[in-house]
Image (spheres, grey):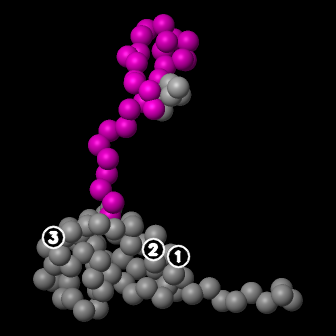
Amino acid sequence: MAAPGFNGPIKPKTRASRAQGTGELPRLGLHPEVPGACTTPRCGAVADTLLEADLPTGWVRAGVCGSTDPDRVWCSGLCATYGVALAELRVDRPAVSADA
């Protein structure tokens, strides 16, 4: 048997269920695209290999200080956020000694 609100059919909310706090889980809206699967040409390209003046309006250059990943250009803020998160994972952290 499916747990209500997860795998079972969604029941319409009634005034009584909302008042008692027993309503179903909210439905999610549109599913956002995964930025790693962006099909825009040059999205995520290394920024030093492109002339930024040739990029369309709205493109973003983003990078993380100390990252081994170079600055890149992104077609949107969503893709840039994804790229910055990946660059943060690649920050070259100094080794911590056992004496510290």
In the rendered image of this protein, does residue 10 appear above or below residue 57? above
In the rendered structure, the answer to whether residue 84 lies left or right of residue 43 reads right
Hey, what amino acid is under mark 3?
Answer: Thr
Segment colored magenta = 7-35
Give the mark nearest the N terminus, 2 or 3: 3
| Residue that label 3 marks | 57
Rendered location of residue 79, percent (x, y): 32, 66
Indicate left or right for 41 with 66 as reference. Answer: left
Which of the pair 47/15 is nearer the observer? Answer: 15
Can residue 93 be seen from the camera position used here? Answer: yes
SS state under label 1? helix
Disc 2 designates what residue?
Answer: 86
Q: Residue furthest right?
A: 99
Amino acid type at image mark 2: Leu
Q: Residue at x 15, y 83 (%)?
A: 53
Tell whether label 1 touches label 2 (CB within 8 Å): yes
Rendered residue at 37%/37% (across/down):
28
Label 1, on which residue?
89
Secondary structure beneath dot 3 equals: loop
Of residues 28 and 85, the one drawn nearer to the viewer in this rendering:
28
Q: Secondary structure at mark 2?
A: helix
Asked whether disc 3 touches disc 1, contact meaning CB atoms under 8 Å apart, the reply is no
Q: Crowdedness of circle 2 by 10 Å Cα count: few (<14), some, many (20+)?
A: some
